[in-house]
Amino acid sequence: MRATTTLILGGGFGGIAAANTLRPLLPAEHAIVVVDESPRFHVGAGKTWIMLGDRTPEQVSQSRIALLAPGVRFVEASVRSIALADRTVLADSETLRWDFLVIALGADLNLAAVPGLAEAAHTFYTVEGAQRLKPVLDRFSGGDVAILIPKAPFKCPPAPYEAALLLHAAFERRGLGGRTRLAIHTVEGAPMATAGAEMGEYIKGELASRAIGFFPQRRASRVDAATKRVAFEDGSEARYDLLIAIPPHEAPIAVRDAKLVDPSGWIPVDPTTMEVRHPAHAGEIYAAGDVTLVPLPGRHKPDVALSLPKAGVFAAAHGRVVAHQIAARILGRAPDEAFDGKGYCFLETGGGRAVKADGSFFELPHPLMRKRTPDEAQLRDKAEWVERLLRPLR
Ligand SMILES: Cc1cc2nc3c(=O)[nH]c(=O)nc-3n(C[C@H](O)[C@H](O)[C@H](O)COP(=O)(O)OP(=O)(O)OC[C@H]3O[C@@H](n4cnc5c(N)ncnc54)[C@H](O)[C@@H]3O)c2cc1C
């Protein structure tokens, strides 16, 4: 058997799961290389905690090398280009060759996609953004807080709603409730629309019970930092004292340049194997996580096609599936794992409570999501999940 190299681009949820699942499946002569431009792995779910000062970035992150199984090589470098024809990737100045390629580069966040947004908005979607927002919130003494979702899809569909509930609780605690109005302006038709109407109604109910405004189907056209106004395509406007945005997401430039995306802007994959279909590389290129578009078989509305939400639990599941697919190819046997569309998410509701919702996204006639009543135990589950993700392997 010829020794192979599996090159994994991105060492986040998807990349780490792919590498760590694949390593014990293959003899040591088969190389596994993970490339990431940053040395630390951050758990997205910890970013609202950073924003609120409940955790430091160090407490919700870990050295990427420590999280990779022994026998996986880590290259700290930026992926500049992906050459499919000659099976290479340029990572800074190093040219890396691959027999199997896994693209797990996540989504790039681009506040500049809406004119004026970058100058006007804070965001908790990055660690740096959440760190910058914390002192702003500490100094905040009341007014209009607008949470803006200008583009979908975005990672972790519950996160903006969770942030609104957590900010509401924090403002109440500080006695700012009477002087503060929170509102969510979103391009979406409903919160977590892929999960179904019941979940959307539940979240809308939680917002309404706290008098948090919810304005769906609003497409932001520009933001004016001087007058503190967001203009929407339908001619309406929203005034704010503090603007918090979910940055528009897009596939990383190296992925777009390699012509791996379809008109959705994301990499289309086989929904069960995560294979990227390519005529010259059958069975050799896979993608995992936020960078993908995973079509769903079911629909809530006959004319609206659905795709899998972007979330770390799914990215990790994809990574595991991809590892089994590649191991099967190398070892010449049938793969023993396929992606089943199942996953879960946590929604913190404030006051030390959270709700865990279990989703089954390949169901017919439409995806299903089941949730329990929020309580302290489910928040402990979330904290333990984050802790497990950060436990070093070496
Ligand atoms: C506020 C917030 C809350 C969230 N809460 C949850 C939650 O409760 N549950 C959940 O499941 N998910 C949650 N998520 C979503 C989750 O973080 C993402 O869906 C997940 O990180 C996707 O994994 P991934 O492997 O596809 O991408 P990532 O984890 O983003 O990994 C991609 C990696 O690629 C690297 N990279 C990118 N471009 C390059 C390049 N050109 N060169 C080299 N390296 C590059 C990046 O450094 C990164 O490490 C949340 C996200 C946010 C922002």
Image: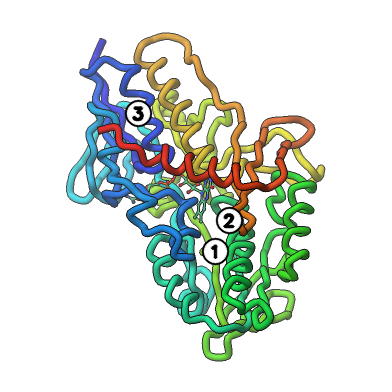
Instruction: Work out whether mark 3 precedes mark 1 in sequence or the reverse, and give the earlier one.
Output: 3
Q: Do the residues labelled 1 and 2 touch (CB within 8 Å)?
A: yes
Q: What residue type is labelled 1?
A: Ile
Query: Considering the numbered disc 1 on the image, is that residue within a helix, a strand or a loop?
Result: loop
| Camera-nearest residue between 29 and 389 | 389
Instruction: Work out whether mark 3 precedes mark 2 in sequence or the reverse, and give the earlier one.
Output: 3
Q: Residues within 10 Å of mark 3 (few under 14, many from 20)?
A: many
Examine the rendered structure and indicate whether residue 342 appears above or below residue 382: above
Q: How crowded is mark 1: few (under 14 residues within 10 Å), some or many (20 or more)?
A: many
> Residue at label 3?
20
Q: Is residue 366 left or right of residue 295?
A: right
Q: Are marks 3 and 1 in contact (CB under 8 Å)?
A: no
At 75% from the left and 70% from the top, the residue drawn is: 211
Callout 2: CB less than 8 Å from ligand 1: yes
Q: Position of residue 299 (x, y in %)?
A: 76, 40
In which quadrant of the rendered image does the C terminus lie?
Answer: top left
At 36% from the left and 32% from the top, the residue drawn is: 101
> Residue at label 1?
246
